[in-house]
Amino acid sequence: MMHHLFSLTLTALLLLGCRPEDTTPVGRYRTAIKEGLEAPAAPMETVLGIDLGIPAQEFFDRCTALNQQQLITMGGGGGTVVDHVMPNDLNRPALMTFHPIFIGEPRTLQALELSFRYDDWSPWNKRASADTLLPDVAAYFANTLGTELIDLQHPRRKRVFASVDRNRLLTLWREDDSTVKGMITDLSTLTGDPLELLQ
């Protein structure tokens, strides 16, 4: 009996040891990042038809056109903070705010910093909390960008959704009770993993 139990335990350990790392959420993320870092740079969509890697002037021209269509308003941060009202895109009306990050000369769009908040958020309205908002925003990007997001645990940010498509990395996380933050980044401009999950 003991010999049989030992054999079963050893077999289970061997099977576990042979399981490929990329079957876990973090393992799948690590594999995707490594492949993304090796992928050739290509224009990749972010939000509202804005692509990573475009010149700064093209970004501002696109925002001017969106403003004229009353799809966005541009505010602080030297005119680079953009608000987009989302009445029907999520499960509840919400506001998306984004801010561009430019690099190089001439300046090109490396990343967008994002934040989301339900319009009816309040400390007592748990249905509008960031815990509910986070998977809602992840579903929005899965639909609009046609991407698969990995739901994983992060040592600092706790629950994180991430996707890698060629050189585009999307990450989303709960910032506080009301707000979900995110980044859409061109991996070809980075030297490593911004979530610091690679080993």
Image (tube, rainbow, N blue to C red):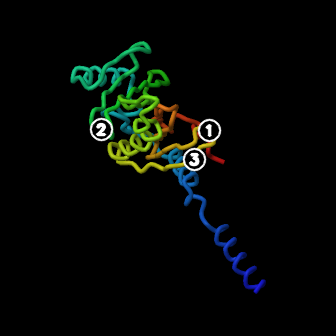
Q: Residue at x 44, y 30 (%)?
A: 114
Q: Is residue 1 above or below residue 19?
A: below
Residue at the bottom extreme? 1
In this image, 63 relative to 109: left or right? left
Answer yes or no: do the residues labelled 3 and 2 have beta carbons within 8 Å?
no
Which residue bears the numbered disc 3?
A: 153
Answer yes or no: do the residues labelled 1 and 3 have beta carbons within 8 Å?
no
Q: Is residue 95 above or below residue 18?
A: above
Residue type indicated by callout 1: Arg
Q: Residue at x 42, y 12 (%)?
A: 78
Q: Position of residue 74 (x, y in %)?
A: 34, 18
Please tell me the numbered disc located at residue 156: 1
Residue type indicated by callout 3: Gln
Closer to the N terminus: mark 1 or mark 2? 2
Which residue bears the numbered disc 2?
A: 89
Residue type indicated by callout 2: Asp
Residue at the left extreme? 69
Cα distance in 3D space between marks 1 and 2 = 29 Å
> In terms of depth relative to the viewer, which is nearer, 109 or 119?
119
> In terms of depth relative to the viewer, which is nearer, 100 or 188?
100
Q: Position of residue 54 (x, y in %)?
A: 38, 29
Quadrant where the N terminus is found in the figure = bottom right
